[in-house]
Every structure is written in C-alpha cells, then in structure tokens.
Image (spheres, rainbow, N blue to C red):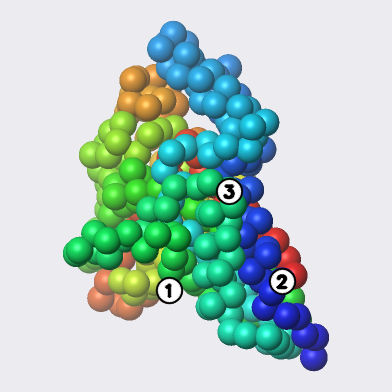
Amino acid sequence: MREINVAEITAAIAALCMEANTDLGCDVENALRQALLREELPLARSVLQRLLENAAIARQEKMAICQDTGMAVVFADLGQDLHLTGGDFVTAVNEGVRIGYREGYLRKSVAHPLSRKNTGDNTPAVIHLRLVPGEQLSLTVAPKGFGSENMGTLSMLTPAAGIAGVRQVVLDTVRKAGGNPCPPLAVGVGIGGTMEQVTLLAKRALLREIGVFHPEAEIAHLEQELLCAINQLGIGPLGFGGKTTALQVAVEWAPTHIAGLPVAVNLNCHVARHRTRIL
C-alpha cells in the first residue's frame, strides 16, 4: 500500500486555492474569446473584452480575478490503496485552505450563519470525499462565490413533469437570476438521485471543462438545446443584453425513485474556477 504524508495534501490545497483564484482556466478564457466573435451588441462586446482584460491582469499580477474569492469547495477522490500518514485528512485540507487564503491575499468570506461572525481564515472547507480504486488522491479546489451560489435552485418534480419539466426548471432559474450571478454563466444541472444527491450532481457538473459535452448522446443533445435556449433569453454578459448568457450547460444524472424527479441547478459566474492536482 502506498503512503503519503498529509503535509503534501496541505501544500497542494494551499497552491490550488491560490491558482484557482488568480489564473482563469484556458477553457473559460477560450469560450469568452469565442463569445466575443459572435456578439454584435457593442455593450456586450465591451463587457467581454473587459472580462478578458481582467483575467489577463489577474494572471500577470497574481491577484484575485474577482473580489469574491468564495468558499473553498474541495472534491477529493481517495484511492482505497493509499494510506495517509502524519495526521487526518480534514485537518490537512483546512490547513491548506488557511494557508492558501492567507498567502494569496484572498478574501476570507466564511461566517457563522446566524451571528455572522467571520471565522477569519476561510475555513472550514466544504469537502466532498469519495473512496475510489487505486493508490492516488485527486484533489480539486472549486472556490464558490455566492453571487452565483445564491441563484441556485432545487426542484422536486413529479415523474409526469418529464424532460419538459427539467427544461422549464433550468430556464426559469437562469431567467430569474438575470444579471445577478454575473453572466456569462456555466450552468450545472443535476437530474435524479435524492434531494441531497441531486444538488451535488449539479455542482460536480460545473467541474467539466467548458466546451465538453456529456458522453451520452441524449444528455449531450439536452445540454446543447438548453444552452441555445438560455442564450436566446437576451440577458447577456453581466446582464447588459446580448447573445452570451451562458458559456456551457453541463448535465449529470443518477437513478432516482419511481415517485420522484429531482432537478437541481447550480450556476457559476464568468469566473468558473477550479484546479485539480493528483498526488
């Protein structure tokens, strides 16, 4: 059985927090450039150009792309043949978040939900841990700002609602959100499972690279259909109108109960951030 010291986890998480918040992914940047070629409305073109300039400055100066550097959401796939030494996993992850947000000069946004007292170091992280075959550990940090997180929805539909009901939920969510989540968006959609599972499916969908569709033809067709319909809403970059309300719709699904059809929608702003490292 392979062993790694949890100090490696802490170092990786710290680096991922800083990289994700300062270096916009090439897939997102390319999608913004493609959108700029399609847009005809001068204001929409101007916004897209400013977003690209902002991303370039953040990368060059190693400054946060957005003032909201989010809650640290960590997706971890732990190989069952990997043994962690030197401490426990959760403590190691939170120490990495603490270091990353301090050394990266990133805003600490985590607070008690009622007293609103800030924890001061952006911990605790939200950790989604899966046990998988093998002897590697995959770590993904996806900082989540709440301008977009607040616009997410969960709907427990009846089976009779069918695919038409799913489409309606997605379009209603984006239409109601308007410019609040800072479009152009990445739209994550979860279908099936249970109440808690479907929301996680929607968030995991946001980890998919922009421009990559689901491997199943039927789901990929739904994604393209929804993307087209969303971009016909006319919300546009930052809500100023135009053809580019979303850069991507990614759908993930899971089997569900015969009596239900859960649907969740999770939105990412134009700063669709995440970074992955394999240990």
Q: Amino acid at mark 2?
A: Glu
Question: For numbered disc 3, what is the local secondary structure?
Answer: loop
> Most extreme residue toward the left, as rendered?
114
* Percent coordinates x, y for residue 104 in the rendering: 58, 48
Q: Quadrant of residue 126?
A: bottom left
Choose between 254 and 92: the one closer to the eye. Answer: 92
The 10 Å Cα crowd at callout 1, few under 14, some 14 to 19, many 20 or more, is few
Q: Quadrant of residue 1?
A: bottom right
Q: Earlier in the sequence, mark 3 or mark 2?
A: 2
Q: Earlier in the sequence, mark 1 or mark 3?
A: 3
The C terminus appears in which quarter of the rendering? bottom right
| Left or right: 274 in relation to 71 | right
| Residue at position x 74%, y 76% in the image | 136
- Residue holding disc 1: 255
Q: Is residue 58 visible?
A: yes
* Percent coordinates x, y for residue 200 in the rendering: 42, 66
The 10 Å Cα crowd at callout 2, few under 14, some 14 to 19, many 20 or more, is some
Question: For numbered disc 1, what is the local secondary structure?
Answer: loop
| Residue at position x 31%, y 71% in the image | 195
The numbered disc on residue 8 is 2
| Image position of 155 with respect to 183: above or below | below
* Percent coordinates x, y for residue 262 in the rendering: 31, 65
| Left or right: 197 in relation to 37 | left
Labels 1 & 2 near each other (Cβ < 8 A): no
